[in-house]
Amino acid sequence: MRNNNVVIIKQGEYMYNELKDISNSNEWKSVEKIEAGWSTDKKYKVVCFDGRKYLVRLSPIEYHEIKLKEFAILTRINNKNISRPIDRGICNGGEDTYLIFNWIDGVEAGQEISKLTFLEQYNLGVQSGRLLREIHS
């Protein structure tokens, strides 16, 4: 059943076949495809029956090794401002690799940054640079 771009899943029913063999997907109550962002990954917001929320990212299987490295790097980062990696694996009959992150409620930065003052934008850029340095070190 669809409701405002959200797929409501009945127990044992899957609207997005590419997600069906992800571990614990039977705990998902709803799945919302996310079209925003710069990445070419397919992205989904998942809400479990108990209220937990996750971000699921799918990439073609040829990116599996790169995504495993990304998962390992992000697992080492302890920063409340970025999503924490929860799980990774292969799905969609071996055609895709997936990463699952905790969901952080908020708005897309591109929509909000223009509302900030120049100094606030600058400080946000500095914070982002520090986070990127931590990720890449």
Image (spheres, helix red, strand yellow):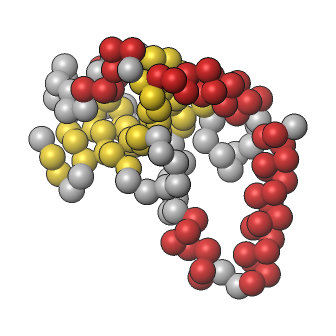
- In terms of image quadrants, where is residue 49? top left
Q: Nearer the viewer, residue 61 or 16?
A: 61
Does 111 sit above or below residue 37?
below
Q: Nearer the viewer, residue 24 or 129?
A: 129
Residue 24 can be seen in this image: no
Residue 29 position within the rendered picture, expressed as x and y whole percent measured from the top left: 27, 33
Q: Is residue 49 left or right of residue 3?
A: right
Q: Is residue 68 left or right of residue 40?
A: right
Residue 22 position within the rendered picture, expressed as x and y whole percent measured from the top left: 38, 19
Give the total number of marks visible in the rendering: 0
Residue 59 position within the rendered picture, expressed as x and y whole percent measured from the top left: 47, 32
Residue 128 can be seen in this image: yes
Residue at the (42%, 24%) spot, across then down: 96
Residue 56 position within the rendered picture, expressed as x and y whole percent measured from the top left: 45, 35
Does 31 sit above or below residue 90?
below
Residue at the (38%, 20%) spot, across then down: 95
The residue sitting at the front extreme is 62
Q: Quadrant of the N terminus?
A: top left
Q: Is residue 81 left or right of residue 7?
A: right
Q: Quadrant of the C terminus?
A: top right
- In terms of image quadrants, where is residue 15? top left
Does 89 sit above or below residue 40?
above
